[in-house]
């Protein structure tokens, strides 16, 4: 039996449906595990991030998703999701990050200068507490390991969340591939595919802080599943949407 992931980014069981950018190597790796894939796209955004799920949708829990209006969400609706459209994304930062909000069980971490107004209001009305940060690419920068343990490679996000989560690991920037021009973020190369499994898009050893990341995850009884060989790659994260019940 299949159901919706109740808490965004934190599945309780094996993930069966996820939002993942259209990167063939990683789509295949996840498909081979029995995970169906939805790949969003918006060509208004820079090509570096135009396929990134964490830029184009925000899962707020259960069957509710907020999405950029300039994309086809028919596959989500067919899966039973109710989709609310936000303001249109713009090409330039920070208004390309309206949906790039990290939502957990109690908090949503966001940049108040750029977060979608309707998404913010919905999450607030749901009873979640806002944690403000100067980083617009908030979800890109944050990896949920458990409900109370997170990893980030952004100082602004680290300072914002360290008082609200029981365990926060700050790692170095720069070891994650995004494009020939820019490096990526750790949240953008990760995603939970089971309660105790964190998928990463590449070999963790390619990150200078891989030992600290392994140890942090092991402490919280979460194992690492590498989806490919080579350098970690920011693909806009792996967003779990449905799971086995």
Image (cartoon, rainbow, N blue to C red):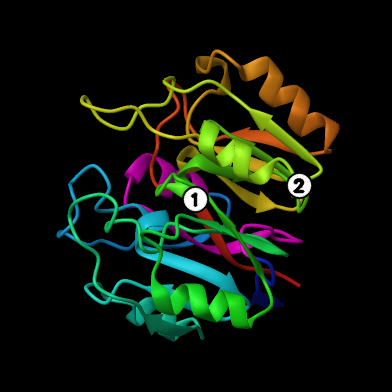
Q: Residue at x 23, y 42 (%)?
A: 48
Determine whether, in the image, residue 161 is placed left or right of residue 27.
right
Determine whether, in the image, residue 90 is placed left or right of residue 213.
left
Give yes or no for residue 108 being in the magenta stretch: no
Label 2 SS: loop
* Corner quadrant of residue 68: bottom left
Q: Residue at x 38, y 43 (%)?
A: 235
Residue on which the image places disc 2: 165
Question: The N terminus is located in which quarter?
Answer: bottom right
Q: Residue 19: x, y in percent?
A: 45, 61
Q: Is residue 59 above or below residue 1?
A: above
35 or 217, which lies in front?
A: 217
State how far apart marks 2 and 1 are (Cα).
15 Å
Sequence-first tag of 2 and 1: 1
Q: Is residue 150 visible?
A: yes
Label 1 SS: helix
Residue 207 is marked as none
Q: Is residue 237 visible?
A: no
Q: Is residue 51 above or below residue 231?
A: below
- The outermost residue toward the top is 208
**Label 2 neighbour load within 10 Å: few <14, some 14-19, many 20+:** some
Question: The C terminus is located in which quarter?
Answer: bottom right
**Label 1 neighbour load within 10 Å: few <14, some 14-19, many 20+:** many
Q: Residue at x 62, y 37 (%)?
A: 159
Tell which tag, 2 or 1, sits nearer the viewer: 2
Residue on which the image places disc 1: 139
Magenta segment, which residues?
Answer: 8-30
């Amino acid at each position: 039996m299949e159901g919706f992931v109740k808490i965004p980014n934190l599945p309780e069981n094996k993930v069966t449906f996820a939002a993942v950018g259209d990167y063939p190597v990683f789509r295949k790796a996840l498909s081979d595990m029995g995970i169906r894939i939805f790949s969003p796209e918006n060509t208004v955004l820079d090509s570096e991030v135009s396929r990134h799920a964490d830029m184009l949708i925000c899962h707020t829990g259960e069957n509710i998703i907020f999405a950029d209006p300039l994309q086809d969400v028919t596959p989500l609706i067919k899966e039973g999701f109710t989709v609310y459209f936000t303001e249109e994304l713009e090409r330039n930062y920070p208004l390309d990050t309206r949906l790039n909000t990290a939502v957990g069980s109690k908090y949503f971490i966001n940049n108040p200068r750029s977060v979608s107004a309707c998404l913010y209001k919905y999450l607030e009305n749901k009873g979640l507490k806002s944690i403000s940060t100067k980083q617009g690419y908030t979800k890109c920068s944050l990896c949920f390991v458990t409900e109370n343990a997170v990893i980030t490679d952004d100082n602004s996000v680290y300072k914002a969340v360290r008082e609200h989560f029981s365990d926060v690991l700050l790692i170095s920037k720069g070891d994650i591939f995004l494009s020939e021009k820019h490096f990526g973020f750790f949240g953008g190369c990760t995603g939970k595919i089971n309660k105790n499994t964190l998928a990463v898009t590449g070999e963790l050893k390619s990150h200078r802080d891989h030992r600290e990341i392994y140890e942090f995850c092991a402490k919280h009884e979460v194992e690492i599943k590498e989806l490919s060989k080579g350098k970690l790659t920011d693909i806009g994260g792996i967003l779990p949407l449905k799971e086995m019940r």
